[in-house]
Image (tube, rainbow, N blue to C red):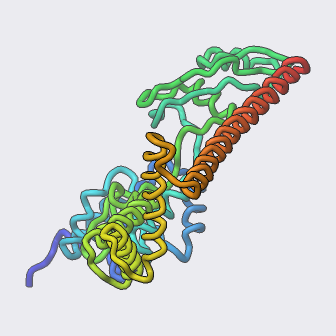
């Protein structure tokens, strides 16, 4: 009988831990590997409580996690590459996208510690503070924060970038940022990868912009609908639009081709009337005697209607301009009062 000497020397508590991890992987719909570096124990406990009923977090040594993964199927073994520094396992029956979104929402701002690397440029805005004059003024100035006294309080007199992305925070600056309640760090469970039914999902896939995603779907649906109408491809969604389009096009064709149908007679008579008036106007312009009195009255009425429409359009333009000038005048007046009364 072949003996596994490597396994025989594993302490019982370690073997039990490995078996527990393997059983959790089999029990839940998915499991993921999360980074817990920099999360205080108290805050981690709170996260575990908040996720209770949705996800289960298992903290174990990296060596034990690797051993458990190596004793399972190949897709599970592949998750070993995401074990790094401080690692924990998360188990859930949610889908990977919901789990990722849930963990991202649970992240909270946190103070930067001395020696920590700035994840982004840290900017201190010009603003008042609640600090009375005292030693803190000198501490702020030594930390590179432009502070002064104004109205009996310490103020930050100008906006300044005090730490560039990638730089380490000096101890005094970290302390002053904390005093100013500037928390540039984001603390939370950092999901590195999730395994679901043999597929590994990384954060770059799970980080879906839902608004953009739905906008893209709506745009695609609209473009598909327009294409089906343009191609005259009938289906339940576009049949009403296709019938309306066909009806409009057939009516326009009938009018253009002068097809005498009962439904078109009104439009054809109107078209003929317009053409007749245009011919009569051209003839009258060359010779007033070319048209009879009845046509002259018709032309006069048409000309009067055109003048009236033009006059109304001009009046609307003038009225709109006057309203704009009045609004501008009111704004200038209010600005003057503001300047007068501070």
User: In this rendering, does residue 16 appear at all?
Assistant: no
Q: How many marks?
A: 0
Please name the residue shown 75% across and 36% down the image: 323
Taking the image as shown, residue 170 lies to the left or right of residue 304, namely left
User: In this rendering, does residue 123 appear at all?
Assistant: yes
Taking the image as shown, residue 45 lies to the left or right of residue 229, namely right
The percent position of residue 220, horizontal first and vertical second, equals: 35, 65
In the image, residue 295 sits, relative to residue 323, either above or below, namely below
Query: Which sits in the foreground, 53 or 209?
Result: 209
The percent position of residue 71, horizontal first and vertical second, equals: 22, 74
In the image, residue 220 sits, relative to residue 241, either above or below, namely above
Please name the residue shown 58% across and 46% down the image: 109
Q: Quadrant of the C terminus?
A: top right
Please name the residue shown 52% across and 49% down the image: 187
The percent position of residue 28, horizontal first and vertical second, equals: 39, 80
Taking the image as shown, residue 11 lies to the left or right of residue 140, namely left
Q: Quadrant of the N terminus?
A: bottom left
Taking the image as shown, residue 132 lies to the left or right of residue 278, namely right
Query: Which sits in the foreground, 10 or 238?
Result: 238
Please name the residue shown 38% across and 74% down the image: 251
Query: Which sits in the foreground, 18 or 165?
Result: 165
């Amino acid at each position: 009988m072949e003996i596994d000497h490597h396994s025989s020397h594993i302490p019982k508590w370690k073997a039990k831990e490995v078996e527990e991890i393997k059983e959790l992987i089999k029990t839940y719909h998915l499991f993921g590997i999360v980074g817990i570096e920099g999360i205080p124990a108290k805050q981690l406990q709170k996260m575990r409580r908040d996720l209770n009923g949705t996800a289960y977090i298992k903290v174990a040594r990296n060596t034990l996690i690797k051993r458990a993964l190596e004793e399972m199927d190949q897709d599970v073994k592949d998750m070993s590459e995401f074990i790094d520094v401080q690692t924990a396992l998360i188990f859930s029956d949610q889908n990977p996208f919901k789990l990722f979104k849930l963990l991202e929402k649970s992240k909270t701002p946190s103070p930067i510690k001395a020696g920590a690397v700035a994840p982004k440029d840290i900017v201190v805005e010009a603003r008042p503070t609640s600090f009375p004059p005292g030693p803190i003024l000198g501490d702020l100035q030594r930390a590179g924060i432009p502070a002064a006294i104004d109205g009996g309080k310490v103020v930050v007199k100008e906006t300044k970038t005090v730490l560039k992305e990638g730089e380490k925070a000096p101890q005094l600056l970290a302390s002053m940022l904390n005093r100013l309640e500037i928390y540039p760090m984001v603390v939370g469970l950092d999901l590195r990868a999730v395994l679901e039914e043999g597929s590994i999902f990384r954060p770059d896939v799970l980080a879906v912009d839902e608004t953009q995603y739905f906008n893209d779907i709506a745009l695609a649906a609209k473009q598909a609908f327009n294409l089906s109408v343009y191609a005259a491809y009938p289906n339940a969604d576009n049949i009403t639009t296709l019938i309306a389009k066909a009806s409009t096009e057939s009516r326009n064709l009938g009018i253009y081709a002068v097809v005498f149908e009962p439904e078109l007679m009104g439009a054809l008579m109107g078209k003929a009337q317009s053409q007749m008036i245009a011919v009569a106007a051209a003839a009258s312009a060359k010779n007033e005697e070319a048209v009879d009195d009845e046509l002259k009255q018709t032309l006069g009425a048409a000309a009067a209607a055109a003048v009236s429409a033009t006059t109304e359009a001009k009046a609307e333009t003038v009225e709109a301009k006057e309203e704009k000038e009045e609004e501008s005048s009111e704004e200038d007046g209010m600005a003057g009062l503001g300047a007068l009364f501070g």
